[in-house]
Amino acid sequence: MKNKKFIFCFFLFALKIYSQDFAILKYEGGGDWYSNPTSINNLILFCNNQINTKISPDVKVVEPDDPEIFEYPIVFMTGHGNVIFSNKSIKNLRTYLLGGGFLHIDDNYGMKPYILPQLKKLFPNKELKELPINHLVFNIYFKFPKGLPKIHEHDGLAPKAMGIFHKKELILLYTYESDLSDGWEDPEIHNDPKHIREKALKMGANIIKYVFEKSK
């Protein structure tokens, strides 16, 4: 039965890996996975206008233990609080990521102490490493010579883009002390200056382009 499910998941992935769809991860633990409700649609609109993607504005919500996750080349996750991945979720997410999927976790402030132990469960033999500023994700379309942009201050720490790699390829991105998805929100929500919002959207577009390019 387990082998049949594994084959089914990869069959779904083979059908959908070239799609340009987007999903939001609904996780357990009590954290607000639904944060920044306008952000993803704004990012999609920006990408479709600026980097010629054809992403559907009909953004789906998936759970980490659901085979439906294999229908999406990229899944986005954010929030402020607790995160728990069940054993079933860990197995499903690991299969998804090792099979070509991509998870972007944007820490909306306060997620770090909860998400890091879950990532260790997800990949106990892999390290979360800071991306060098010459990594393709900072240069693939828009140029970020200083790396991840700072959108909101919070603790005033430097922004970090950290990743998990498989066969030298980035499969999971954790953005910390940047708050990218706040910068994707409607302008009136945070009243960020236009140039700050543009930085956030351009960085988001780079991430999307990186994922779609590696999926070809």
Image (cartoon, grey):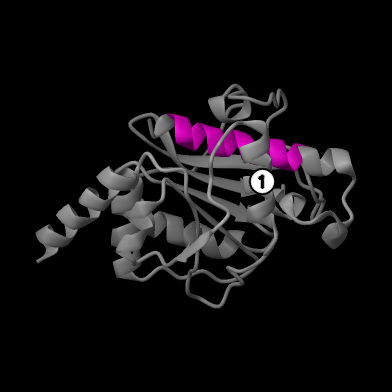
Q: Quadrant of residue 214?
A: top left
Q: Position of residue 67 (x, y in %)?
A: 30, 62
Query: Taking 79 as reference, is 120 left or right?
Result: left
- Is residue 205 found inside the magenta-colored segment of the image? yes
Q: Position of residue 212 (x, y in %)?
A: 46, 35
Q: Which residue is denoted by mark 1 in the rendering?
A: 45
For the C terminus, give its image quadrant. Answer: top left
In the image, what residue occupies the spot 11% across and 60% down? 4
Magenta-highlighted residues: 199-213
For the residue marked with disc 1, what is the amino acid?
Leu
For the N terminus, give its image quadrant. Answer: bottom left
Above or below, comparing residue 16 to residue 121 in the picture:
above
In the image, what residue occupies the spot 47% across and 49% down? 21
Given residues 114 and 216, the one toward you in this image is 216
Give the structural element (helix, strand or loop) at label 1. Answer: helix
Q: Position of residue 18 (x, y in %)?
A: 37, 39
